[in-house]
Amino acid sequence: LFRTIRMNRVKSYTVIEMLVVMLISSLSIGITYTCYTIFSNHYLSYKKRSDELANYILLDKLMTKDVSVSAKVEKTSLGMNCISKNGTIGYEFYDQYILRRSTIVDTFYVVMSQPVVFKRMGKTENIPGALVEEIGMETIYKEEKLYFYYKKNYGADVLIRFDDLAI
């Protein structure tokens, strides 16, 4: 009789075995989720820092190109215009951002610590329409000051033509 009862038993897990499996599963899921959260937050902060730095690098690259390629750089009431035979590219400088106007408008979120300095022949020029030879900007990135400096060298023909128009 004892043998027949044993043979009709269904093989299964005990409650203790199931509790141990559930405990181990919940621990592994909890550790995995915690690791995922830590790595996700780390990646997002890295991406944010990287995007901010890329913003400064792109602004510097475009301003260097625009100033060097232009035939002349003129001061405007809000910033400057880089005038070339291909058209005009305008820059407007504000405390928290810089606008670059060409065929499209680009916005660079750059914190300015001081107003942009425009110089001609070593003297500061703040008159709209004045020819600009040097541009200096002081910005703040992660509580550090970054300095940007651009110089436009003109030929005598441009300087004479521009001075004749000013007279």
Image (cartoon, helix red, strand yellow):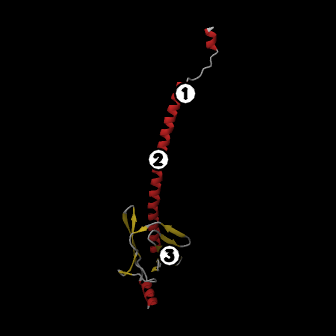
Separation (CA) of disc 1 from disc 3: 71 Å
- The single residue placed furthest to the front in the displayed view is 15
Q: Which residue is mark 2?
A: 39
Closer to the eye: label 2 or 3: 2
The tally of labels here is 3
Mark 3: which amino acid? Gly
Q: Is residue 51 above or below residue 20?
A: below
SS at circle 2: helix
Task: Say the numbered circle drawn on residue 90.
Answer: 3
Q: Earlier in the sequence, mark 2 or mark 1?
A: 1
Closer to the eye: label 1 or 3: 1
Task: Please identify the quadrant where the N terminus is shown.
Answer: top right
Q: Is residue 37 above or below residue 15?
A: below
SS at circle 1: helix
* Closer to us: 42 or 58: 42
The location of residue 21, given as percent across then percent down, is 52, 29
In the image, 62: left or right of 117?
right
Q: Earlier in the sequence, mark 1 or mark 3?
A: 1
- The single residue placed furthest to the top in the displayed view is 1
Q: Is residue 153 above or below residue 106?
A: below
Separation (CA) of disc 2 from disc 3: 41 Å
SS at circle 3: strand
The location of residue 119, given as percent across then percent down, is 38, 79
Mark 1: which amino acid? Met
Mark 2 surroundings within 10 Å by alpha-carbon count, few (fewer than 14), some (14 through 19), many (20 or more): few
Q: Which residue is mark 1?
A: 18
The location of residue 117, given as percent across then percent down, is 39, 76
Separation (CA) of disc 2 from disc 1: 32 Å
* Closer to us: 88 or 26: 26
- The residue sitting at 52% across, 78% down in the picture is 85
